[in-house]
Every structure is written in structure tokens, then in C-alpha cells.
Amino acid sequence: MYSVKIDKVQKEIKKIKGVKKCVSNRLSIKDFRKCLLKKQLYYDSMYVLRSKVHQIYTQHISKLTLSYLDDKRFIRVNDIDTYAWGHYRIKNTPSSTSSAPSSTSSNKNILY
């Protein structure tokens, strides 16, 4: 998920994986910032077309659209910058907001 604002064209580019365009169009760059800096989760609902045994139907689902939690990256102390898991600087970087992935071994030098 990311959001980019282009000043010259007055355009916002918003990408949220697994969420319909109608939902991402309702969100602004302020919502992305609020999610990241104030640590808020955003849920939204949408209608999707599904098919089961060649029968097409609509389904109303509620999804987590914006989340400050990122379990695929090591979040640094400033809550914005990240490292990939296994990066050489992780052992020397204290972080209170990161959580370890479930497949890692317990290393006392890494602060999770």
C-alpha cells in the first residue's frame, strides 16, 4: 500500500492491494499519514463478484484497508524507515514496534 501526491498535476496515486478502486478513491493521503503516524487501522466494506459452481453472485465483504503494521519488514525506531529481514544493521538497531516473523530463530541481539 502506498500513496503519492503529484503537485504539478494536482493528482494522487493510491495503491492498496486487494481493495477495489471505489474504496481507495474514498481515501486521501491524509488517511495514509494518519494510519502510519497515529497507528490507526482502517476497515472498509465493498461489493465483489464471486462465482461458485458456475453460479455468479455478489458478496458484501469488510476488509482491512490501511494498516500501520508491516510483518514483512523490520520497522525502525522512527516508525517510517524499514529494513528487510536479515539486514546486517538489524542487530544494532533498537526497535520497540517491530515484531519478528514466525520463522526466525530466537536471537538475543535482535530487539523485537
Image (cartoon, rainbow, N blue to C red):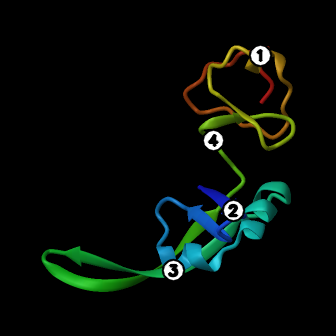
- Answer whether labels 3 and 4 touch (C-beta < 8 Å): no
- Depicted 10 relative to depicted 104: above or below: below
What residue appears at the point 58 percent right and 77 percent down from the top-left corner? Answer: 25
As helix, strand or loop, the secondary structure at mark 1 comes to helix
The residue where tag 4 is placed is 71
The residue where tag 3 is placed is 22
Q: Quadrant of the C terminus?
A: top right
Query: Which sits earlier in the primary sequence, circle 4 or circle 2?
Result: 2
The tag on residue 48 is none
The residue where tag 2 is placed is 5
Q: Quadrant of the N terminus?
A: bottom right
Q: Gap in Å between the C-alphas at discs 1 and 2?
A: 34 Å
Q: Gap in Å between the C-alphas at discs 3 and 4?
A: 26 Å
Foreground: disc 4 or disc 2: 2
What residue appears at the point 82 percent right and 16 percent down from the top-left corner? Answer: 92
Give the residue type that dot 3 points to: Cys
Query: Which sits earlier in the primary sequence, circle 3 or circle 4?
Result: 3
